[in-house]
Image: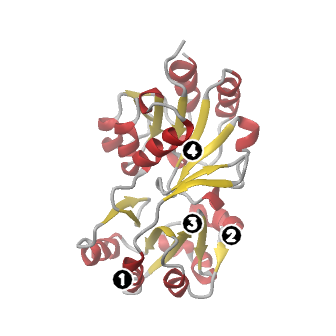
Amino acid sequence: MSKYRLAAFDMDGTFLNSRKEIQPSTVEACKRASAAGRILAIDTGRAVSELTLYPFGEMGIRYGACTCGTVIYDFALEKVLAKKVIPAEFIPILAEASAKEDLMLQVMVNGISYVEAADVANMPHFQMAVYQPLYEATTSLVEDVRAFAIEHAHEVNKMNMYHATPDGRLRTQERLTHLPLDFTYAEQTSFEVTPQGVSKGTGLVDLCEVLGVPIEEAIGVGDAFNDVPMLEMAGLGVAMGNSNEAALQAADVVVGDNDHDGIAEVIDRYLIG
């Protein structure tokens, strides 16, 4: 019998295969874990609204640490259980900096994603073509996303800036690095902004606290740089076989990749035991 009671999975590159699909073996393994009384969760940079297309309920996945740990969510009750926000005084600064580069700005408020329609139509330009169908189906459209962010300055959980080029991302970072916020690279040119000290790792800690599960009894599974805090804070950090070097170094163990039943291996070998 495994000592672990909860497993939290990153989405892209981990829970989803390279075609952005859930492997059949993952579905069946999740059902086995749920039947065995284990708790399953998603720990992701995505907004809650970007997760609505997935059949989590059928798989036994009830909880999410979303938007890089800023929103703890109950999918069954459709309820925010806990949240953290970027200090309101920084929102105008972030909005102004985002206007200086060729980028797509995404603002997340209470777990909901907000973008401009013109940017969604142009997502290939921002190195995000693979996500365009998802954004078309799940995001809320606003006429002026920067004005929207300023209007909702006291409620912003996270901001993503999807640049046209890596050089643009670097310039944005240089403009903002003086602020007491956390910045993370993701995808090819994405620059993610969250409250200082908040990460997928603190999201997992907060989720465990809400559920009354000791962090030592939680498994964190990921593949990328922004998963490192989760891998380090979990009782057991698991890197997928397709992980980058940072995730591999942070993990306690490595399993198969996201196209070859890696999630099923985590569940059967470590969560159920």
The residues bearing labels 3 and 1 have C-alpha atoms spaced at a distance of 28 Å
Q: In this view, does 264 lie to the left or right of 251?
A: right
The residues bearing labels 3 and 2 have C-alpha atoms spaced at a distance of 11 Å
Can you identify the residue that label 1 sits on? 93
Label 3 with label 2: CB-CB less than 8 Å: no
Number of numbered tags placed on the structure image: 4
Residue 79: x and y in percent read 67, 54
What secondary structure is marked by label 4? strand
Which amino acid, by three-letter code, is at mark 3? Ala
Which amino acid, by three-letter code, is at mark 2? Glu
Label 3 with label 1: CB-CB less than 8 Å: no
Label 3 with label 4: CB-CB less than 8 Å: no
Q: Can residue 84 be seen in this view?
A: yes
The residues bearing labels 3 and 4 have C-alpha atoms spaced at a distance of 23 Å
Q: In this view, does 226 lie to the left or right of 209?
A: left
Can you identify the residue that label 2 sits on? 136
Which of the two residues, 123 or 181, is positioned nearer the viewer here?
A: 181
Q: In this view, does 234 lie to the left or right of 175?
A: right
Could you say which disc has been placed on residue 129 in the image? 3
Residue 218: x and y in percent read 47, 31
